[in-house]
Image (tube, rainbow, N blue to C red):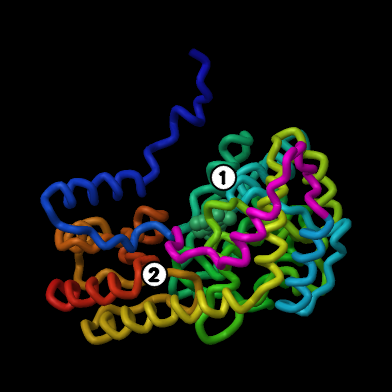
């Protein structure tokens, strides 16, 4: 049977193994509190749900890949209010079916093996989809480590000329999953200057820009020159809408035009009723403020515990995660196994990439009562 060798080589997603381990613990009668995956468990705002229902018509024809003009305008309006930037909804924005599919397939849009633009760079520890998209597109993946001593931003000075010239796309993700770090606009400016010089695309995955605690993160959309820049954002985390699948790509009109040409082939235009719900979601900030406040309370609860117990917090500026140093000299995996045996599931940093060894990630997704229960357990275990 001719199965893709890339697919055959793909190993089990580590989180699947983590969930299997949790089921084994539950089979022993221990209730597991799940801080593993970043899937929000909050209810979606009723106004957004209603807009979805109202968007359902007798006949729903094929949605257009470029998306509804109302949605593109709602996204441009949000970007204007949030980042003080102007986006032309006609040429600089395209809605996506959540950001994962758009991230995965982006290598297909920009990798050019004939011209030697064969490399996709991304940072690790990190979201695994950048690498998988590169592999399926036949590109060369290049993992760049994120080190704490370097502020969890990739060391651009360590990249040689040949690598710069072979780059098709450089993925960055701030606020960063899993390190919770943010990056200053100056970092984006430096990278975008390299992109213009060497002819590659800066793809900025900004899934977590809205989940911040003290300071509002910046966006690559704020660059004075957005040539070769594409920004990916989503309603999944901002509006607790993972199941709706709704996001967008915005940036350089040449890239948006390439996406408009590519996406009808893949069939990834979001359903119109989802697009109508998304218009309401991008237009409202009150529910986002409530969500942020809720994550803030859970964060405080856990940070207080970790501080009391001498567990060092390596990152907690933004996102729905905390990034913590494994205490003592245990490996990430054995430490998290120990917590799991007491009913608290967290992610070993090593599951997110080699440079994640020595850390663990806590997704602030359980309800506040469950977080309080976990604090009581960890009080004894740590
Ligand atoms: C860094 C990062 N980017 C993108 C996504 C994808 O989000 P969605 O496809 O739900 O928009 C996630 C989801 O967890 C993520 O962690």
Tell me the magenta residue range.
39-68
Q: Is 1 displayed left or right of 21 in the figure?
A: right
> What percent of the width, then of the height, locates residue 18?
29, 50
User: Could you say whether the residue bearing mark 2 is in a helix, strand or loop?
Assistant: loop
Above or below 80: residue 125: above
59 inside magenta stretch:
yes
Image coords of residue 87 (percent x, y): 83, 67
In the image, 142 versus 30, the foreground residue is 30
Tell which residue pokes out farthest to the top in this image.
1
* Foreground of the two, 247 or 8: 247
Q: Position of residue 23 (x, y in %)?
A: 23, 47
What residue sits right under mark 2 in the picture? Answer: 364
Disc 2 packing (10 Å; few <14; some 14–19; many ≥20): many
> In which quarter of the view is residue 296 placed?
bottom left
Depth check: 31 or 348 in front? 31
The quadrant where residue 367 appears: bottom left
| Count of marks overlaid on the render | 2
Residue drawn at (34%, 44%) of the image: 16
Q: Earlier in the sequence, mark 2 or mark 1?
A: 1
In the rendered view, would you say 132 is above or below 70?
A: above
Q: Which residue is mark 1?
A: 141
236 sits to left or right of 224: left
Question: Does residue 198 sit above or below 216 in this rendering?
Answer: above
């Amino acid at each position: 049977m001719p199965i893709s060798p890339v697919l055959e080589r793909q190993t089990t997603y580590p989180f699947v193994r983590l969930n299997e381990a949790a089921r084994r613990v539950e089979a022993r009668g221990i209730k597991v509190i799940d801080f593993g995956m970043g899937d929000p468990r909050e209810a979606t705002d009723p106004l957004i749900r209603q807009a979805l229902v109202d968007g359902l018509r007798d006949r729903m024809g094929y949605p257009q890949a470029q998306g509804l003009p109302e949605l593109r305008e709602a996204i441009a309006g949000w970007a204007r209010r949030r980042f003080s930037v102007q986006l032309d909804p006609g040429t600089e924005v395209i809605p996506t079916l959540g950001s994962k599919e758009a991230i995965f397939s982006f290598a297909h849009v920009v990798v050019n093996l004939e011209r030697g633009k064969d490399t996709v760079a991304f940072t690790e520890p990190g979201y695994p989809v950048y690498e998988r998209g590169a592999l399926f597109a036949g590109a060369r993946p290049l993992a760049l480590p994120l080190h704490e001593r370097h502020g969890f931003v990739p060391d651009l000075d360590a990249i040689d000329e040949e690598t710069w010239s072979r780059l098709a796309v450089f993925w960055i993700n701030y606020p960063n999953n899993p390190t919770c770090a943010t990056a200053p606009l100056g970092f984006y400016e430096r990278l975008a200057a390299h992109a213009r010089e060497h002819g590659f695309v800066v793809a900025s995955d900004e899934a977590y820009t809205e989940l911040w605690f003290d300071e509002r993160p910046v966006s690559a959309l704020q660059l004075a020159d957005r040539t070769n820049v594409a920004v990916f954002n989503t309603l999944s985390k901002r509006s607790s809408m993972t199941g709706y699948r709704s996001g967008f790509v915005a940036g350089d009109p040449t890239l948006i035009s390439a996406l408009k040409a590519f996406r009808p082939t893949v069939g990834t235009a979001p359903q119109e009723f989802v697009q109508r719900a998304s218009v309401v979601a991008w237009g409202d900030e009150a529910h986002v403020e409530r969500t942020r406040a809720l994550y803030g309370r859970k964060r405080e609860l856990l940070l207080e515990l970790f501080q009391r117990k001498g567990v060092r917090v390596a990152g907690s500026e933004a996102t729905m995660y905390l990034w913590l140093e494994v205490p003592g000299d245990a490996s990430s995996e054995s430490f998290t196994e120990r917590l799991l045996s007491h009913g608290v599931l967290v992610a070993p940093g090593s599951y997110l990439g080699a440079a994640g060894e020595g850390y663990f990630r806590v997704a602030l997704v359980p309800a506040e009562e469950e977080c309080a229960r976990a604090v009581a357990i960890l009080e004894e275990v740590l």
